[in-house]
Amino acid sequence: MEHEVDKRSFYEVKKGFMSWAITLDHKRIGIMYLVSVLIGFGLGGLFALALRLELITPDKLFMADKMYNQSFTLHGAIMVFLFIIPSIPASFGNFMLPLMLGAKDVAFPRLNLASFHIFLLGAAFLVLSIFLGAVDTGWTFYAPYSLHTDTSVVCAVFGAFIMGFSSILTGVNFIATIHSLRPPGMTWFRMPLFVWALYSTSILQVLATPVLGITLLLLMVERVMNIGIFDPSLGGDPVLFEHFFWFYSHPAVYIMILPAMGVMSELVTTFCRRNIFGYKYIAYSSIAIAVISFLVWGHHLFVSGQSDFASMLFSLLTFLVAIPSAIKIFNWIATMYKGSIDAKSPFLYFVAFILLFCIGGFTGIVLGSLSLDVNLHDTYFVVAHFHYTMMGGVLMAFLGAVHYWWPKMIGKMYNELLAKIACFLIVIGFNVVFFPQFLMGAKGMPRRYHVYDPEFHVYHVISTVGSWILAVGFIMVLYYLIQSLRNGEKAPDNPWGSLTLEWKTTSPPILENFESTPSVTCGPYEYKGSPS
Amino acid sequence: MNQKADSLVDKGGVWFSEPISTYAAQSDSLFYFILILSIIMFFAIGFVMFWFMIKYKRTEERPEADGQLIHSNFLEISWTVIPTILCLFVFYWGYKDFLTMSIPPVDAMEIRVTGQKWFWEFETADNGLKTTGEFAVPVNTPVKLIMTSKDVIHSLFVPNFRMKRDVVPNRYTRVWFEAEKTGSYKLFCTEYCGDAHSKMLATVHVLSDEDYEKWVDKNLSSDSVPLDVIGKKVFDVKCSICHSTDGSKKVGPTWKGLFGSKRVFEDGTSLVADDDYIKESINEPSAKIVSGYKGIPMTSFLGSVSDREIDGLIEYMKTLK
Amino acid sequence: MSEHYVVPVKTYVKTLLTLIFLTFVTVKIAEFDFGSLNVAVALFVAMIKATVVALFFMGLKWDKGFNAVILITSLIFMAIFFLLTLGDIETRAQTDKVEAMRFGINSPVNIIGEGHSESHSKKH
Amino acid sequence: MSELDSKFIKHEVAHHFESAEQEFDTAKLGMWTFLGQELLFFSALFVAYAVFRFLYPAMFLEAHRHLSVNMGFLNTIVLLISSFTMAMAIRSAQVSNKKHTFIYLLVTLVCAGMFMVVKYMEYMEKFHHGLLPGRWFTGEGTSEVLHIFFGLYFCLTGLHGIHVLIGMGLIIWLLIRTQKGEFYSEYYTPVEMVGLYWHLVDLVWIFLFPLLYLVG
Ligand code: HEA
Ligand code: HEA
Ligand code: CUA
Ligand SMILES: [Cu+2]
C-alpha cells in the first residue's frame, strides 16, 4: 500500500446528511438498509398488533371488514417486501460480505447505492398506497380479485415491482463480488459459510425476482387495459397468475431463510469455539436449497384447480427440499459437540432458531403432504407454519445477527442481561401467539377471516395476549439498543473471539476496511485444536 | 331444517374436528404419523442441544474446545438418507390418500355449486332443487360437487369432511365426499374473496334417507308462499351482506325507503325507483350506478335470481318504508 | 488489457451472413406445414440463430467459461418454469375444455358472420 | 501508450480492484448475471404465450395472419445488422480506433431507430384495424378470445420495444463518451457491456419473430 490509510472509523471520515445519501461505502449502505428494514418491521408489527387486537372478539371490534382486509394485506406485504427479503442480505450482507472476504468494497459500489435508492423509491410507493386506498388483496395479489377491487392495487404493486429490481441488483452485485474480489488465499472453501449463503441467495434473487417483476407488470397491464391474460371473464386463466406468483414467491421464502442459515453457521462456530462440522455439506446444501426451491412452487396450488399430476410432482419435489435443511440442522448440532459453549445472547437466538425452525419445518412437511394440505390449506395452520419459519426462523436469525455484529457495526456493547431477558420474552411470546394457531387451523379456522365462529374464541384470545408479550420483548430490544448507541461501553475489536476476517479490523471498521489486505492461509473456523 | 351445526372444537381430538367423510380418518392418521415422528425428532434435537450446552459450557478452566471433530461420512450419510426415506414414505402416503380424495366414484350423486360474492348456491342435479346457503345430502351416499364461480376465486371447505377445493370462475372444479354420520356441518369459504369473505358460510345437512326425502319435498314446494316472504328469504341469503333494511349504509345502498324514491346516479341522471328499475338493478347492476358507489359495482344476479324471486324482492322492498 | 482477443472482421461478417441466411430459412420453412411440429421447427432454427449470436457476437466462444455457465443456468431455470407450468396446464382435467364452452366469455372481439352490432358484447 | 495518451482520457481503476483486468472481468460477469435476469424477465411472457397457445390453438392460427411477415422480416434483418455493427464498434474500441467506434455506434443507433419506426408503422396498422390492446380492442374475428393474442403481442413487443429504447439511450451515452475519447484498448468496458445488452435484445427478437409472425 503506497498511500496512507485513514485510521478513523468509517463514521468519522465524513459527516452530514449528504455523506450518507450519496455514499458509495458498503458499510454505510448496510447501515441505511438496517435502519430501513427496522422501520419496515415496526410498521408491519404495528399492523400485526392492530389485527391481533381486532381478532380478540369473534365479531367486529373496531375495524370494518375492508379495513381488516387492508390490515393483513399491508402487514404481509410490508413484512415480506420491506422487512424480511432485504433484512439479512441487504443489511448484514452489504456490511459484512466485503469484510468477511477481506475486500475493500463490493464489486459495484455505485450499483449498490442505486439499489438502495431504488429500494427506497419502491418502499415509498408501497407506503404511499396506504393513503391512496390501501390494498386489500392479500400479499399474494391473486387475480381476478386484484383486478376488480377498487383499492390502490396498481400503486402498491408498482412499489413491489420496483423493490424487485433493488433485490436483483443486490444479487448481481454479490455474485460478482464473491467471484472476483476474493483476495489471494481466499479459496471457495475458505469462505465463511455466511458468504456461501449469500451466494446462493443471490442466485435466487437474480433468477426468481424478474419473474415477480413481469408478473406484477402483467397484473398492472391487465388491470389498466384488460388484456385478458389473467381475467377469466375475458378468457384468461387466473391459475396462471398463481403459477407466476409462486414461481417467485416460493424461492423468495428461501431468499429469506438462506442468509438466516448463514448467520447460524457463524453463530454456532463462534460461540462454541469450534470448527464447523461438515463445511462442504453445509455449503453445498445452500446451493441445493437454492436450486430445488425453484421446483416446488406448486405446493401452494394443491387445491387451486391445478392438475393432479402437477400436484403429485410438486409434492414429491417439496419433500426433497427438506433434506438439505435437515443436513444443515444436524451439522450445526454436531458442531456443538465437545465445543466450548458460551451462551451469550446471540447464541440464545441460535438455540431459538433451531427449535422454532424445526417446528416450522416439520409443519412444512405436513403441508407438503398432498392429502393433509387439502384440509389445512388457507387455514391458520398455514399462518402458524409460515410465522414459525419466517419469524421463528428468519427473525430469530436476524436478531441473532443484530446482537452478534452490533459491536462491530456500531462499536459499542449492549446490556447482556437485558438482551437475554428480551430473548426469553420474545420466544415465549412468539409461541403463545402462534402455537394456538396450529390447533385452531387444524380444527378448521380459515385464514383472512375478519369475523369468525365463536368456537375459536379461546384460541384467538391467547394468541392476541401473546402478541402483547412480543411487543414488550421488542420494545425492550429497542430500548437497550438505543441505550447502547447513546452510552454503551466501547466494544473491543473482537469481543467474541471469532476467527472470521470481519473481526480482524477495528470496531467499527475503518473506511478502507483493513489497514492492509489480509492474507488468508486457512479456513474460516480453524479454532484451537483444529486438524490441519 | 335450522338445526345448529356441529361444533368443530368440542368434538374430535385436540387437533382435528370429528371425521365425518369416508376418507377423513384415513388422512388424519398420516398427520398423527408425522406428528409423532416430529415430536420424537424435536425432543431429540432439543435434548442433544441442551445437553451439549450444559456439558460443554465454557468455563475459566476450559476456554477452548475439547476436540475438533469436523467430519464423519457415516453421520452425513445417515442423516441424509434416513430423512430422505422418511420423506418419500410420507409423500407416497399423502399422494395415495389424495388420489382417493380427488377421484369421485362414478355413481356419485351430482350437486352443482356456484360461488358468488358472498354466498353459495347449490343445485341438485337429480331433482333440480336449488338452495342457497345450505344443502342436504343423504347419509352414506357418495356426492360429487361440480363447482364454478361467477366472479372471483372462492374455495369450498368443510372441515369435518377434510374437503377443500378452489372454485374458479370460468372453469369447473370438483370434489366428492361420502358422509358417514348424520348431522349438520359447517362450510367455509377459504379463498380470500373480498370484504365479506369471512361471512361466506354455509351448512351441509347430512340426513337419513327419509329425512332427505322430506327435505327435498319441503324445499321444492315453495310456490304457494306469499311473494314478500320469498323476497325476504332471498334477501337474507343473497342481499343482506351488502344491503341493509334499517337505513344504515353497507357495501351497497340501504333498501329502506328505496322503492318509489328518487335515485341519483354517478353520471348525473336520476329517476324514480320503480319495478323496472329494480329489475334492471338486479340483472344489470352496472347500467346505472348509484351516486357514491363508483368502483364497487354489484355483481349481476342475472340467471341466479328467478323472475318470481325478483317479484318477491320488489314486494319485500315495498314493505320497507 | 491488451491480451483480449480481437476478433477478425471476417468472423463477424460471416456471422452476420449466417444469421441473415437462417432468417430466410425460417421464413421459407414456415410456408410448409409440419402440423404440430411447426413450432418445434421454428424454435429449432431460432435456437441455432441464438447460439450463433451468443457464441460470436457476444463472444462466448472466447470468453471466460463461467459466463457461459451463467447463461446456461438461466436457460435451465427458464426450462423448469416452462415445463412445470405446462405440466399443469396440459394435464388439467380434460373435462374443462368441453365444459368451458358453456361460459359466455365477455369478449371484446366482433364475431364475424353474426352481424356486427348485436354480437358486439358490452364493454366492461 | 504515449501516443495514445494524447488522444484518450486515461482510465483510473477503482480503488477496490487490483488491476484493470480484474475490473473488466468483474464488470462482464456482473453484466452476464444481469442478462440472466433479463432472460427470466422475458420468460414469463413466453410461458404465457405457450399456455394460451395450448389452450386456444385455433385462435393463434387465426391471429398470426393479422401480422405482417414482411415487416417482421425487415425488422429482424435490421436488428441483425445492428448487432453486427455493435460488435464492430466494440472491436474498434478494442483497437483504439475512435473514429470507427463512433461510426459503428452511430449506425447501430440508426438501425435501432429504423426498428422503432417499422414497429410504429406496424402498431398503427393494428390500431387501424381495431386490434388495440385489451380494453380498446374492437377487432373482428371468429374466435372469442382473439384479444388475448394481441394482449400478448403488445406486451411482448412492447417490452422488447422498451428495451430497444433503453438501448438507444445507452448508445447515445456511449457516443458522447467516445467523442470525449474515453474508450481505447485499455478501457472499453462500457462499450462491451452495452454491446452484450444489445445482443440480448436481438436474441429476444430472434424468438419473437417466428413465434408471433410465422407459426400459428
Ligand atoms: C422463511 C420462510 C419459509 C420456509 C423456510 C418454509 C419452508 C417450508 N415450507 Fe413453507 N411457507 C412459507 C414460508 C416458508 N416455508 C410461507 C410464507 C407460506 C405461505 C404463503 C401464503 O400462502 O401466504 C408457506 C406455505 C407453505 C405451503 C403451502 C401451504 C398452503 O398454503 O396450503 C407448503 C406446502 O407444502 C409449505 C411447505 C414448506 C416446506 C416443506 C418447507 C421446508 O423447506 C422445511 C424444511 C425444514 C425442516 C423439515 C426442518 C428441519 C429438518 C430436520 C430437523 C430433519 C428431519 C426432517 C425430516 C425427516 C422431514 N409451506
Ligand atoms: C416477516 C414476516 C412476518 C412477521 C415477522 C410477522 C409477525 C407477526 N404476524 Fe404476520 N403475517 C405475515 C408475515 C409476518 N408476520 C404474512 C406474509 C402474512 C399473510 C398476509 C396475508 O394473508 O396476505 C401474515 C399474516 C398474519 C396473520 C393472519 C391474518 C389473517 O389471515 O387474517 C396474523 C394473525 O394473527 C399475523 C400476526 C402476526 C403477529 C402477531 C406478528 C408479531 O410477531 C409482530 C411483532 C411485532 C411487533 C409487536 C412490533 C414491535 C415494534 C414496535 C412496538 C416498535 C414500533 C415502532 C416503529 C419503529 C415504527 N400475521
Ligand atoms: Cu368467497 Cu372467500
Ligand atoms: Cu412454498
Image: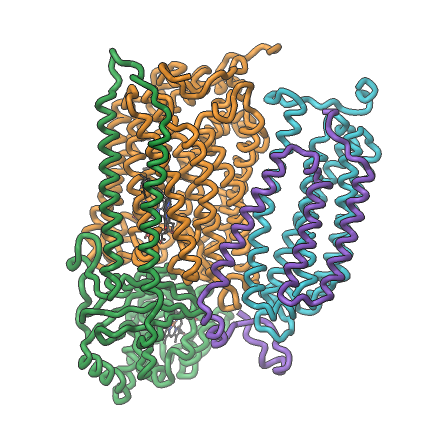
Q: Is residue A61 left or right of residue A503?
A: left
Report whether residue C109 is seen.
yes
The colour with which the image depicts chain B is green
Residue at 52%, 51% in the rendered image: C81
Residue in front for this viewpoint, A59 or A407:
A407
The colour with which the image depicts chain A is orange
Chain depicted in cyan: D
Report whether residue A491 is seen.
no
Residue in front for this viewpoint, A479 or A531:
A531
Q: Is residue B90 left or right of residue D177?
A: left
Quarter containing the C terminus of chain A: top left
Residue in front for this viewpoint, D195 or D127:
D195
Q: For the view shown, which residue lies furthest in the left direction?
A: B10
Vertical comparison of B143 with A511: above or below: below
Residue at 28%, 21% in the rendered image: A338
- Hey, which quadrant is residue B24 in on the image? bottom left
Query: Measured from the top left, where is residue C59 in percent x and y?
Result: 71, 38
